[in-house]
C-alpha cells in the first residue's frame, strides 16, 4: 500500500468543486425522484405510449430518465443511490410490462438506435452490481435473444432478420399493421427516407393520405425486413454477458456478426447500411448500399452510422483482441471526410443543437463540414463532423492514426476547441473537444471551468424542476414523455473525464471503457470514497498521471484499477516524485492521510488481460 501524508498549502479549487459536484448530485437525484416518480420507482404517467407506429415507441424514453444514475454510483455517488437505481429499474420495467411494451423484461421489438439508448441504464447496472445473480441472469437472457438459437438471428446468413426486433423476435415493418408515412410531422426536417421512388417531397405525402399509405408500403417492403447496420449495437448486450459470465459463446457471436458486416463492406469503399434476409447488400433497395433504416439516407446518416460502426468495431476488437476490426469503425468517418469542404455556418442543413453554441460566434467564417447523408442524388446534409465518435475511438484504440484523424478535425475547425459551453444534450456530451485540448496540454484551465459548468447545468435542471407545474395525472397527452430526460439533473460527463480519464459513453449503447476505475478501500464498493477527489492529467498508457486529494479530516483508502474490467495491467506505479515500483497486476491501493494530496504515475499495458466484471465484485 502506498501512503501519502503530503499536505498542500490549500485544497486545490478543482478538488473543492469536484466534491461540491458530488454533493449536489446527491441532492439532485432525490429531488427528481420526489417530483417525478412513485414510491415503487415508476415514473408518474397516466397516458399510453405510441406515436403513430402501433405503440412501438417509448421504452427508451422511460429508461433514459435514469441512464446515468448507476454511473454516478460507480464514480462515487452516495451509498443509497444504488438502491434507488434498482427501485427505478424495477418500477419502470413493471410499468412498461403492464403497457405491453416489454416481454420478460425486454423490449418487444424496436430499432437499435432507440434500444441502445434505453440499455445504457442496464449496462451501467452491470458495472454497479456485477456480483448480483439477478443482473447476471438478465444479461444472459437478453443476449441470448440475439445469439444462434434465439428468435432474431439467422446464423446461416449471419443477419438479424428485421430492423425492428426484440424479445418477440422480428417485428416486420414499422407497425403491427400497415403504417402510412410520415408517421409524425416532427420528421419533416429529415425529408423522405428513399429519394428514388418518384415522390417530390415530405409535404406531398402529408397532403395526400393515399400517397402516404403507398409510401409507407414501399418503406415496409424495402426497409422493414432484412438486416440494417444499426443492429450491430446489439453486440453490446453480448459483451456485457461475456464480461459477467465469461462464456466464450458471447464473444464468438460478436466476432461472427460484426465479421459479417465487415465482409459485406469488403466489396466497396463505404460500409453498407442494409442486407436482405439472404445476407446480400441491397436486396430490397435495387442493389444500393444505402437506404437502410437508421442508415446512410435517413434520418441521421453519419451520426447513426458512425456510432454503430465505432461500437461494433470496438466491441469486436475488445472481445477478440484483434484491432483489425477497428477499420470498420473508421470507415464512415473516412468516407465522409473524402467529401469534406469548408462551409459557412448558415450552410448547415440539418438539426444542429449539438453545435449551435460552437457556431454562434463564427459569423460568415467557414469551417470544416462533411455531408452526413447519401441518396441517389449523391451526398447531402452538410454539418459539423460528429467529433465525439472519433475522440471515443481514439480513446479506445490509442492508435496514432486515430489521433491524426482527431487532429485533422481540430485543424479544420474555425471555432475554439478549448471553449467550455454550458450545454446539456440528452446524451450529456458536448465537451469532448475542450477535454481533448486539456489532455494535449493546450487547455490547462479546463477542469475548473468544466466543473463549474457541470454545477451550473445541474442547478439549472433543479430550478426547472422547481418551476415545473406539469400535472402528470391530468389525463391523456398531458405529459411529453421526453420531459424526464430533459429534466434529469444528474451530470456525469465531466466526472467521467476528470476522475477516470474517459469520454462520455456513446448514447446509443456503448460499454463504458474507463481508463482508470476507483474503488473504496475494501476493493468492492465502486467509486471514490467520501472526501476524495481525483484528477487525470495524462492518460498516456506509458505515463498515466492521476492527482488525488483527501479534502476531509479522516484518512481515506482508495483502490485504483486499470480499466473498467481490470483489463489494463499496471506495470509500475510511482508516488509523487518517488521511485517507480513494479506492480504487474490490475490494482494499486493508496491511503491518503487527512488533507493529503498524492500524485500517482502509472505505467499501463492496455488490454493485457482477459476483461471481466466478476473480479472484485
Image (spheres, rainbow, N blue to C red):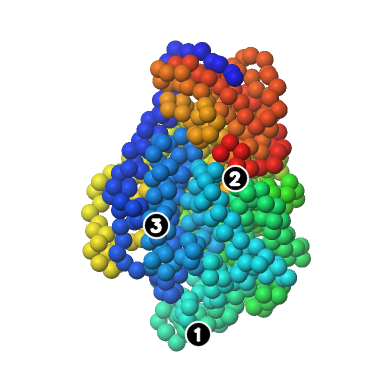
Q: How many marks?
A: 3
Cα–Cα span, label 3 and label 1? 37 Å
Q: Residue at x 55, y 76 (%)?
A: 172
Q: Is residue 136 left or right of residue 10?
A: right
Closest to the observer, 42 or 117 = 42
Name the residue beneath numbered marker 2: 392
38 lies above or below 264: above
Name the residue beneath numbered marker 3: 92
Q: Is residue 273 left or right of residue 164?
A: right
Which quadrant holds the N terminus?
Answer: top right
Q: Position of residue 19 (x, y in %)?
A: 41, 29
In the image, which disc is placed on residue 157?
none
96 lies above or below 408: below
Residue 53 position by quadrant: bottom left
Disc 2 or 3, which lies upstream in sequence? 3
Q: Residue at x 48, y 16 (%)?
A: 593
Q: Is residue 419 visible to us here?
A: no
Q: Nearer the viewer, mark 2 or mark 3?
A: 3
Q: How crowded is the residue under tag 1: few (<14 C-alpha within 10 Å), some, or many (20+)?
A: some
Residue lying at the far bottom of the rendered structure: 210
Q: Is residue 213 left or right of residue 46?
A: right
Q: Residue at x 53, y 76 (%)?
A: 173
Residue lying at the far front of the rendered structure: 133
Q: Secondary structure at mark 2?
A: helix
Cα–Cα span, label 2 and label 3? 30 Å
Q: Position of residue 263 (x, y in %)?
A: 75, 63
Name the residue beneath numbered marker 1: 214
Residue 62 position by quadrant: bottom left
Closest to the observer, 115 or 423 = 115
Amino acid at each position: 500500500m502506498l501512503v501519502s501524508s503530503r499536505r498542500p498549502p490549500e485544497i486545490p479549487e478543482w478538488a473543492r468543486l469536484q466534491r461540491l459536484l458530488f454533493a449536489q448530485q446527491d441532492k439532485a437525484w432525490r429531488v427528481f425522484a420526489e417530483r417525478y416518480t412513485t414510491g415503487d420507482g415508476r415514473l408518474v404517467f397516466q397516458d399510453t405510449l405510441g406515436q403513430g407506429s402501433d405503440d412501438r415507441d417509448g421504452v427508451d424514453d422511460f429508461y433514459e430518465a435514469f441512464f446515468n444514475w448507476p454511473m454516478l454510483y460507480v464514480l462515487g455517488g452516495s451509498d443509497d443511490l444504488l438502491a434507488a437505481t434498482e427501485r427505478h429499474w424495477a418500477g419502470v420495467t413493471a410499468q412498461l410490462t403492464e403497457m405491453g411494451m416489454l416481454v420478460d423484461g425486454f423490449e418487444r421489438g424496436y430499432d437499435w438506435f432507440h434500444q441502445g439508448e434505453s440499455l445504457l441504464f442496464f449496462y451501467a447496472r452491470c458495472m454497479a452490481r456485477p456480483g448480483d445473480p439477478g443482473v447476471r441472469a438478465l444479461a444472459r437472457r437478453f443476449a441470448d435473444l440475439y445469439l444462434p438459437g434465439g428468435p432474431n438471428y439467422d446464423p446461416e446468413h449471419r443477419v438479424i432478420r428485421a430492423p425492428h426486433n426484440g424479445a418477440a423476435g422480428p417485428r416486420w415493418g414499422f407497425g403491427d399493421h400497415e403504417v402510412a408515412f410520415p408517421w409524425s410531422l416532427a420528421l419533416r426536417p429529415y425529408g423522405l427516407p428513399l429519394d428514388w421512388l418518384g415522390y417530390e417531397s415530405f409535404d406531398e405525402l402529408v397532403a395526400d393520405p393515399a400517397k402516404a399509405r403507398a409510401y409507407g408500403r414501399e418503406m415496409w417492403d424495402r426497409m422493414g425486413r432484412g438486416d440494417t447496420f444499426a443492429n450491430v449495437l446489439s453486440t453490446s448486450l453480448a459483451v456485457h454477458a461475456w464480461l459477467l459470465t465469461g462464456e466464450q459463446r458471447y464473444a464468438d457471436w460478436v466476432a461472427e456478426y460484426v465479421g459479417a458486416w465487415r465482409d459485406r463492406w469488403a466489396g466497396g469503399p463505404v460500409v453498407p447500411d442494409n442486407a436482405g434476409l439472404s445476407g446480400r447488400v441491397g436486396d430490397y433497395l435495387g442493389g444500393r448500399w444505402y437506404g437502410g433504416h437508421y442508415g446512410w439516407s435517413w434520418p441521421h446518416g453519419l451520426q447513426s452510422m458512425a456510432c454503430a460502426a465505432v461500437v461494433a468495431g470496438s466491441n469486436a476488437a475488445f472481445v477478440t483482441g484483434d484491432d483489425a476490426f477497428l477499420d470498420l469503425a473508421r470507415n464512415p468517418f473516412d468516407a465522409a471526410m473524402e467529401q469534406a469542404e469548408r462551409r459557412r455556418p448558415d450552410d448547415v442543413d440539418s438539426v444542429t443543437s449539438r453545435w449551435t453554441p460552437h457556431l454562434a460566434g463564427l459569423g460568415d467564417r467557414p469551417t470544416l463540414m462533411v455531408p452526413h447523408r447519401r441518396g441517389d442524388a449523391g451526398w447531402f446534409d452538410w454539418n459539423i463532423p460528429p467529433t465525439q465518435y472519433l475522440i471515443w475511438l481514439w480513446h479506445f484504440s490509442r492508435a496514432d492514426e486515430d489521433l491524426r484523424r482527431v487532429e485533422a478535425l481540430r485543424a479544420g475547425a474555425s471555432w475554439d476547441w478549448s471553449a467550455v459551453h454550458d450545454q446539456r444534450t440528452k446524451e450529456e456530451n458536448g465537451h469532448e473537444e475542450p477535454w481533448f485540448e486539456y489532455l494535449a496540454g493546450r487547455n490547462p484551465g479546463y477542469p475548473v471551468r468544466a466543473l463549474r459548468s457541470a454545477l451550473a447545468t445541474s442547478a439549472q435542471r433543479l430550478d426547472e424542476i422547481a418551476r415545473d407545474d406539469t400535472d402528470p395525472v391530468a389525463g391523456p397527452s398531458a405529459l411529453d414523455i421526453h420531459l424526464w430526460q430533459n429534466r434529469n439533473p444528474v451530470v456525469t460527463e465531466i466526472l467521467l473525464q476528470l476522475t477516470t480519464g474517459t469520454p462520455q459513453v456513446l448514447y446509443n449503447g456503448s460499454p463504458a471503457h474507463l481508463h482508470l476505475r476507483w474503488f473504496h478501500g475494501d476493493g468492492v464498493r465502486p467509486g471514490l470514497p467520501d472526501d476524495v477527489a481525483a484528477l487525470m492529467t495524462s492518460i498516456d498508457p506509458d505515463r498515466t498521471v492521476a492527482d488525488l486529494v483527501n479534502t476531509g479530516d479522516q484518512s481515506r483508502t482508495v483502490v485504483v484499477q486499470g480499466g473498467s474490467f481490470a483489463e489494463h495491467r499496471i506495470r509500475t506505479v510511482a508516488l509523487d516524485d518517488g521511485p517507480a515500483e513494479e506492480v504487474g497486476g490490475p490494482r494499486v491501493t493508496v491511503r491518503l492521510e487527512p488533507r493529503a494530496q498524492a500524485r500517482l504515475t502509472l505505467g499501463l499495458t492496455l488490454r493485457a488481460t482477459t476483461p471481466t466484471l466478476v473480479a472484485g465484485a
